[in-house]
Image: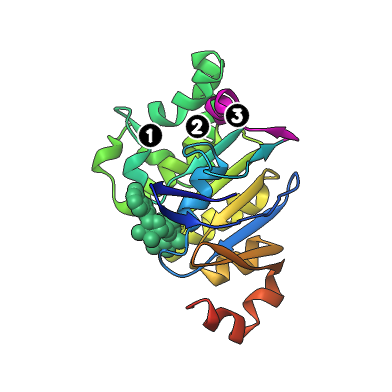
């Protein structure tokens, strides 16, 4: 597919890749390469200009794009784009409740993830008044509590301290959900993702096993990394 934000200025050109159930794929590339845009197209926030996106063998038409949130979640680059309820616990329970869980069950799902991510102590806090790393983990809890089949992550470790980063990586390793992780963190990519897609100026410059892509210094340099 190709996609962009403004007429006549395509950000993504001929981007093609697929992800299997349960697979973890890192999406790397220089600043402005198109990682976040790729995630927005994949999760239905923006429509491709040409080509298409399919989920579970079904092309995402307008209607399917609007309901994809039920099966695929996204954790935004900036957690302020994600958190909006008065407390962390309510925020994390919002998604599961919208999916149809009873408020009690939604609260249990939210609590479980707040605990697993080590932030149960923040449950009653206002998300707007958390630190950057705390916000990131709160946003993650809300998405994980929805138990999606596929999760898109945009720089999941940004703002995290080493301990929070370790907790997050361990939590993500324990989730069998397929993941597409846009990141500059090659260590995270190596630990979590068997496969890596390299974007360069809106095109796929490489798609292969993570150690091979990350080990190819010439390839990374030609992609501006
Ligand atoms: N809302 C927008 N309107 C217009 N152009 C945009 C918008 N968001 C991003 N772009 C442009 O699209 C291109 C790709 O941006 P994108 O955010 O996808 O890059 P990225 O790979 O995620 O970069 P980073 O590593 O900095 O997060 C850039 O040239 C950027 O300037
Ligand atoms: Mg980005």
Q: Residues within 10 Å of mark 3 (few under 14, many from 20)?
A: few
Q: Which element carries disc 3, helix, strand or loop?
A: loop
Answer with mark 2 or mark 1, whichever residue precedes in sequence. Answer: 2
Is residue 159 in view from this perspective? no
* Residue 199 position in % (x across, y down): 55, 65
Q: Position of residue 188 (x, y in %)?
A: 56, 65
| Label number found at residue 123 | 1
Q: Residue 149: name its quadrant.
A: top right
Numbered disc 1: secondary structure: loop
Mark 2 or mark 3: whose residue is earlier in sequence: 3
Region in magenta: 56-70
User: Image quarter for residue 27?
Assistant: bottom right
Dominant secondary structure (helix, strand or loop) of the stretch shown in magenta: helix
Q: Real-space Cα distance between discs 2 and 3?
A: 34 Å
- Tag 2 and tag 3, C-beta contact below 8 Å: no
Q: Which residue is mark 2?
A: 111
In front: mark 1 or mark 3?
A: 3
In the image, taking residue 164 as reference, residue 175 lies left or right, namely right
- Residue at the image position 53 percent from the left and 61 percent from the top: 166
* Image position, residue 34 (x, y; %): 47, 59
For the residues bearing labels 2 and 1, Cβ distance under 8 angstroms: yes
């Amino acid at each position: 597919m190709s996609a962009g934000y403004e007429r006549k200025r395509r950000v993504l050109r001929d981007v093609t890749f697929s992800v299997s159930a349960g697979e973890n794929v890192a999406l790397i590339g220089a600043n402005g390469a198109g990682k976040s845009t790729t995630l927005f197209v994949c999760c239905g926030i923006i429509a491709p200009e040409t080509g298409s996106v399919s989920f579970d063998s079904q092309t995402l038409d307008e209607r399917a794009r609007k309901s994809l949130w039920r099966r695929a979640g996204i954790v935004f680059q900036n957690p302020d784009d994600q958190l909006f309820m008065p407390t962390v616990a309510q925020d994390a329970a919002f998604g599961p409740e919208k999916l149809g869980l009873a408020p009690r069950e939604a609260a249990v799902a939210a609590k479980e993830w707040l605990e697993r991510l080590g932030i149960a102590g923040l449950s009653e806090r206002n998300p707007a008044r958390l630190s950057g790393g705390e916000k990131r983990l709160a946003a993650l809890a809300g998405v994980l509590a929805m138990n999606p089949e596929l999760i898109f992550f945009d720089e999941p470790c940004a703002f995290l301290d080493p301990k929070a980063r370790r907790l997050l990586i361990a939590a993500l390793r324990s989730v069998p959900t397929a993941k597409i992780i846009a990141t500059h963190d090659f260590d995270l990519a190596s630990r979590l993702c068997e496969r890596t897609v390299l974007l360069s100026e809106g095109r796929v410059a490489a798609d292969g096993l993570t150690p091979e892509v990350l080990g190819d210094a010439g390839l990374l340099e030609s992609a501006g990394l």
